[in-house]
Amino acid sequence: MEKNRLLICDDHLIFCEGIAEVIRSKYPKIEINICLSISEAQKMLDAQAFEILIADIKLPDGDGIEFVFKNKLKLSDTIVIVLSAYFNPYIIDKSKKAGVDYFLKKEQSTNDIFDAIEGNKSNKLLDEGFVFDNQTKATLLSKQEREIVHLISLGHVSKEIADLLSISKSTVDTHRKNIHRKLNTTNTAELLKLMHDNKI
């Protein structure tokens, strides 16, 4: 790969420096810029073009995917890579609409990062194979977990759900944690959005 400008946007400096070191080990001539916030990234992007952008989703002052969407025109010739610990169909769909090229989970291998940097379309990680279909999502949840999701959608809190299902609040809380784990959601709003969009 010829010398390129790469921008890494993540609020964990040690993580940014680690990724930068990994990338430099393969591409020693690459120019790497690091920013720790959306506002910093915006200033850098306004000042110069980047051939590659690696961004996290959750930053102190905004959302990395929304940043990409806002700058879709400026990033039209940029390989956009989202590198995140969060992964679910709702986020994937949001990334696609924003113009993200690759969605990598932080535990994936360095080779996946290199493939994305090189624009390897055969390993593009936003294909439909990474998104559960509706039937698969539904089967991930037990009958009681689906009942709990339904009651959550009606606005009930854990104590009320426990009373309605004649189980303890701690059992409800455990089920809620398992639901988030199975569907890769991080909060109730995200869970309900996913369930609503996929008619589950």
Image (cartoon, rainbow, N blue to C red):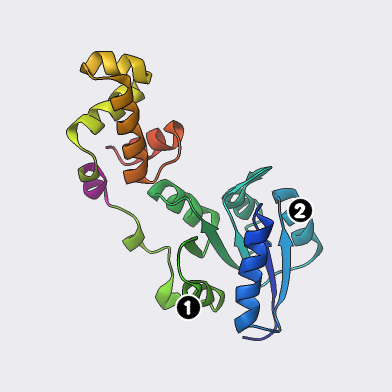
Instruction: Return the residue at label 2.
Output: 40
Q: Is residue 84 above or below residue 17?
A: above
Give residue 78's quadrant in the image: bottom right
* Residue 120: assigned label: 1
Q: Quadrant of residue 51?
A: bottom right
For the view shown, which residue lies furthest in the left direction?
Answer: 143
Number of numbered discs visible in the structure rendering: 2
Lower position in the chain sequence, tag 1 or tag 2: 2
Q: As displayed, is residue 20 above or below residue 40?
A: below
> Is residue 109 depicted above or below 47 in this figure?
below
Residue 78 in sight: no
Q: Looking at the picture, how far across and down is residue 13, in whole percent? A: 69, 57
- Cα separation, mark 1 vs mark 2, equals 29 Å
Residue at the image point whose x is 50% and y is 60% from the top:
106
Residue at 49% from the left image edge and 53% from the top image edge? 85
Which SS type dominates the magenta stretch?
helix
Name the mark on residue 185.
Answer: none
Near-viewer residue (100 or 172) = 172
Compared across the picture, whether 41 is left or right of 168 comes to: right
Query: Which stretch appears magenta?
Result: 133-138
Q: Residue at 74% across / 61% down in the picture? A: 45
Residue 18, percent across and down? 63, 67
